Image (tube, rainbow, N blue to C red):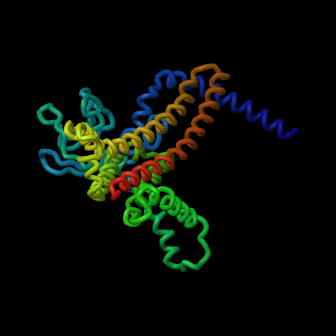
Amino acid sequence: MKLVKHIVCLLLLLTTTLTAMSAETTEKSQSLNVSEIVIEHIKDSYDWHVTDIGNRHIVINLPVIVKSSTGWHVFSTSEFAQQPDSEGYRMGPDHLALATKGDHTGKVVELVNGKEVMPFDISITKTVAVMFINVVILLCCILFPARWYRRHKASDPAPGGFTGLMEMLVTYVEDNIIKPGVGDKGYEKYSPYLMTCFFFILTCNLMGVVPFPPGSGNVTGNIAVTFFLAVCTFIVTQFSGTKHYWKDIFWPDVPMALKAFPLIPVIEFVGIFTKPFALVIRLFANMMAGHAIAVSLVCIIFIVMSKALAVMIGMSVLSIVMAVFMMLLECMVCFIQAMVFTMLSSIFIGLAREK
């Protein structure tokens, strides 16, 4: 009986609270721009937005490192003005500004005679900062098990806990992804690179699901990161190519008419570049879409704040359930995308090594 009373009291309290929230947030929910929130979450930035408390923005200021016409400049993003001026610039030191509109929106520009000039920019942005943190986490995940193996013999019992989990992952990736893709002979020299790709992508993906620092960074949803990983796979694949691999590209076993009219060789040559391009787009699009969907579902909670109480409660509960489901689904996608990238890379290397 006491339990029933407690549940009724909690429901009354929840109803009162939600009614008050509905009245207070009507104006805010009507002006909520979902697309702007989603884009702000998945795009890169010069500062690390944590949360908002009232009208106060809690951010982590990151270093800006640029070379303009007046030389090198290193300063914090806190030196930019909080609000843009009439022309849409958040002014900073030495005629540098952060553009908030135009062709260079979100970029640091130098204003020279009223015109925008792009400086040489090697700033530590949010994506770079999160990537450095992910690398440190990845090193810890690898070095701690390595320390255990240095202190134990091969005849000792199998490790448990985190070391056992890492051993299971390493064994799974090597036996089920790298070895079948590259081949049973000579796969060992490619294992370090392919293992690095798998665990780096997996770490970045999982940390991107964490909604607060040191996570929340959309590293693999940044096409520059996926492009670099694909270029690395492209270089390893081409340098692993045998005579048979290059012969199949420029002089394939097809009728002479197709060789004289170089349709097949052209297609095969173009295929050299389309394979890594597929790696770029697949990883980038899947991770960016996952983040966008999860944020959009959370925004539904705030959109329905101005509706009737029953609608607000029902849609809020539904949005929370869907957001949790999408987060769990994205955790699975994190592993699948890391596995797919590693598997395709190993297959490309294995095809290049055929004799």
Return the residue nearer the eye: 36 or 196.
196
Depicted 131 relative to depicted 287: above or below: below
Residue 35: x %, y % from top left: 43, 28
Residue 265: x %, y % from top left: 24, 42
For the C terminus, the image quarter is bottom left
For the N terminus, the image quarter is top right
Residue 288: x %, y % from top left: 43, 39
Q: Residue at x 20, y 50 (%)?
A: 73
Horizontal side of 40 relative to 19 (left or right) equals: left
Q: Residue furthest top?
A: 308
Which image quadrant is residue 6 in? top right
Q: Is residue 227 visible?
A: yes
Depicted 151 relative to depicted 144: above or below: below
Horizontal side of 153 relative to 68 (left or right) equals: right
Q: Residue furthest right?
A: 1
Q: Residue at x 52, y 36 (%)?
A: 294
Return the residue nearer the eye: 309 or 286.
286
Return the residue nearer the eye: 352 or 17.
352
Depicted 185 relative to depicted 71: above or below: below
Residue 45: x %, y % from top left: 34, 42
Return the residue nearer the eye: 127 or 183.
183
User: Total of numbered circles in the picture?
Assistant: 0
Q: Residue at x 54, y 46 (%)?
A: 331
Q: Is residue 134 visible?
A: no
Horizontal side of 17 relative to 127 (left or right) equals: right
Q: Residue furthest front?
A: 256
